């Protein structure tokens, strides 16, 4: 007998097959039982008709409890009433693993309870849809960069340097030395760009941020491309093309998941149009002031309400260009004619999801960088390898970092970044 997965049902119509699945839900009357079956690839219905199976099988079906694992034997049929389009006419049921009093019932549960049961919550249809979109974004990321001649380079996770500032570091012991968990692979990617031209990384990063918001994780995954012989304007073009490509990929390949999530596809389709609008930091401050934000002054970083207001002024993701030097990391290229801003951009997602990309052109002047490293209170010795990159064949180069979880959160339209990663690490939560 052929065993198959639910997603392949369309290729087996009329055949008797075996499927390993879990019972997500069940309805039954005197003569018929409907099992909602899931196997991780999809959901479909198993139909058990009393006078088509043995009395034993029918009783077993009626008594199956939520999340019991079963091996089902039956015939695949078309089912025009369901969106999935196929069902299985059940002939035999073998219980593989019993399940009693499954904690997550179809009723409403509080978020804390669900987070405590994250290992089981992942089985629910909404979580499944979110992870399907996440997986597609990962697949499309490799596809986009591989087809554009980027080389995937893996920066280290245990590091001795702090590219994004020293306040948010996770400290760890590296034998008799102090080390940190990586908060960004960027500095290593700069070295890689000078070796391979165009590179990208995709890995976990760690930030001991004390902020408890809908956008912050302690451990998150970042995609960090870095390009040699490239100025900021060309980098912005790659960024908008990449994000548009991600959106198009989920429209093309995640139709069912987007339906489960009730995501507005017409709205997503707008985000596939490039170029994205650009606004300078200066103009963004003016825009905010003109619209009643009295708390913002030139030189301040934007908070969530500011980013949301700016995003709502546009129909697509928007780049905010050239922030004040004082609120950005040491490595950004200084503006050619102004002392107070650097050549950088953040991409702000629409609909209030905030910053999804941070990037910049990189400073190339040896003396300038050395001075910045000292100014930021960083140890010159630890950065001497980084400064070498400016000594031996330095070139203009630019790069950026896209946060995977912020992007998943935006594109799935969920409320909180904690549901965008299988096992979120949050302030006060490292379980399960
Ligand atoms: O803006 P960030 O800090 O930029 C960098 O780390 C640069 N070194 C990247 C580069 O140029 N190679 O972080 C980049 C992105 C943010 O725009 C956001 O999407 C995400 O990483 N991010 C977070 N996501 C979830 N939780 C957090 N605590 C995050 N901090 C940053
Ligand atoms: Mg940033």
Image (cartoon, helix red, strand yellow):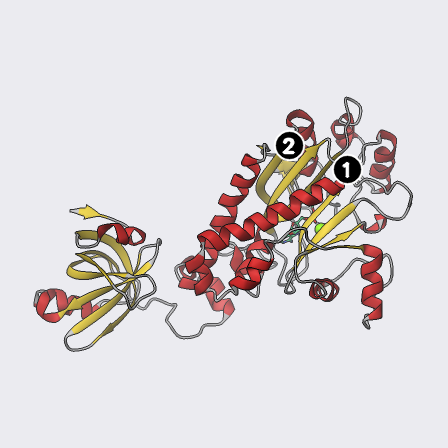
In the rendered view, does 31 fall on the left or right side of 405? left
Q: Is residue 316 visible?
A: yes
Image vertical order of residue 365 relative to residue 111, above or below: above
Q: Is residue 183 visible?
A: no
Displayed quadrant of residue 334: top right
Q: Which residue lies furthest to the bottom in this view?
A: 30
The percent coordinates of residue 141 (x first, y second) are: 54, 43
Name the disc covering residue 362, or none. 1
The percent coordinates of residue 12 (x first, y second) are: 22, 51
- Assign a secondary structure to mark 1: loop
Q: Residue at x 41, y 59 (%)?
A: 256
Which residue is at the front of the view, 26 or 378? 26
- Assign a secondary structure to mark 2: strand
Name the disc covering residue 315, or none. none
Name the disc covering residue 198, or none. 2
The percent coordinates of residue 75 (x first, y second) are: 17, 57
- Distance, label 2 to label 1, CA atoms, is 14 Å
Q: Residue at x 81, y 71 (%)?
A: 291
Image vertical order of residue 282 relative to residue 374, above or below: below
Which residue is at the front of the view, 13 or 163? 13
Displayed quadrant of residue 49: bottom left
The percent coordinates of residue 302 (x first, y second) are: 77, 60
Mark 2 and mark 1 lie on one chain; the one further toward the N terminus is 2
Q: Is mark 2 within 8 Å of ligand 1?
A: no
Would you say the residues marked 2 and 1 are in contact, meaning their CB atoms lie under 8 Å apart? Answer: no
Which residue is at the front of the view, 192 or 169? 192
Q: Residue furthest top?
A: 392
In the rendered view, does 359 fall on the left or right side of 150? right
């Amino acid at each position: 007998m052929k065993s198959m997965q639910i997603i392949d049902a369309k290729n087996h119509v009329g055949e008797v097959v075996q499927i390993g699945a879990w019972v997500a839900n069940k309805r039954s009357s005197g003569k018929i039982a409907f099992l909602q079956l899931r196997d991780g690839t999809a959901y479909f219905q198993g139909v058990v008709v009393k006078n088509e199976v043995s009395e034993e099988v029918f009783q077993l079906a009626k008594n199956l409890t939520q999340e019991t694992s079963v091996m089902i034997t039956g015939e695949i049929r078309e089912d025009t009433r369901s969106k999935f389009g196929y069902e299985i006419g059940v002939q035999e049921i073998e219980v593989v693993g019993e399940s009693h009093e499954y904690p997550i019932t179809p009723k409403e549960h509080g978020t804390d309870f669900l987070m405590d049961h994250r290992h089981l919550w992942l089985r629910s249809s909404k979580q499944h849809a979110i992870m399907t979109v996440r997986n597609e974004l990962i697949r499309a990321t490799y596809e986009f960069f591989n087809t554009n001649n980027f080389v995937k380079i893996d920066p280290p996770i245990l590091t001795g340097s702090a590219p994004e500032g020293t306040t948010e570091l996770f400290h760890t012991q590296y034998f008799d030395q102090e080390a940190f968990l990586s908060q960004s692979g960027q500095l290593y990617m700069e070295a890689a760009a000078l070796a391979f031209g165009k590179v990208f990384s995709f890995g976990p990063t760690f930030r001991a941020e004390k902020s408890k918001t809908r956008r912050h994780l302690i451990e998150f995954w970042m995609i960090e491309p870095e390009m040699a012989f490239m100025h900021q304007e060309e980098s912005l073009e790659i960024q908008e093309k990449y994000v548009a490509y991600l959106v198009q990929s989920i429209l093309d390949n995640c139709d069912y998941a987007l339906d489960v999530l009730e995501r507005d596809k017409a709205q997503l389709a707008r985000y596939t149009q490039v170029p994205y609008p650009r606004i300078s930091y200066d103009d963004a401050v003016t825009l905010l002031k003109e619209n009643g934000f009295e708390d913002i002054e030139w030189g301040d970083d934007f908070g969530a309400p500011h980013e949301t207001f700016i995003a709502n002024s546009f129909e697509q993701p928007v780049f905010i260009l050239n922030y004040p030097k004082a609120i950005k990391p040491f490595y950004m290229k200084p503006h050619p004619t102004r002392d107070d801003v650097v050549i950088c951009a953040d991409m702000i997602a629409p609909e209030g999801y905030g910053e999804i990309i941070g990037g910049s052109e990189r400073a190339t002047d040896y003396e300038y960088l050395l001075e910045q490293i000292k100014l930021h209170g960083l140890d010159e010795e630890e950065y001497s390898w980084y400064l070498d990159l400016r000594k031996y064949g330095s070139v203009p180069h630019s790069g950026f970092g896209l946060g995977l979880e912020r992007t998943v959160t935006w594109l799935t339209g969920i409320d909180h970044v904690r549901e965008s990663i299988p096992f979120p690490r949050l302030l006060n939560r490292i379980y399960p």
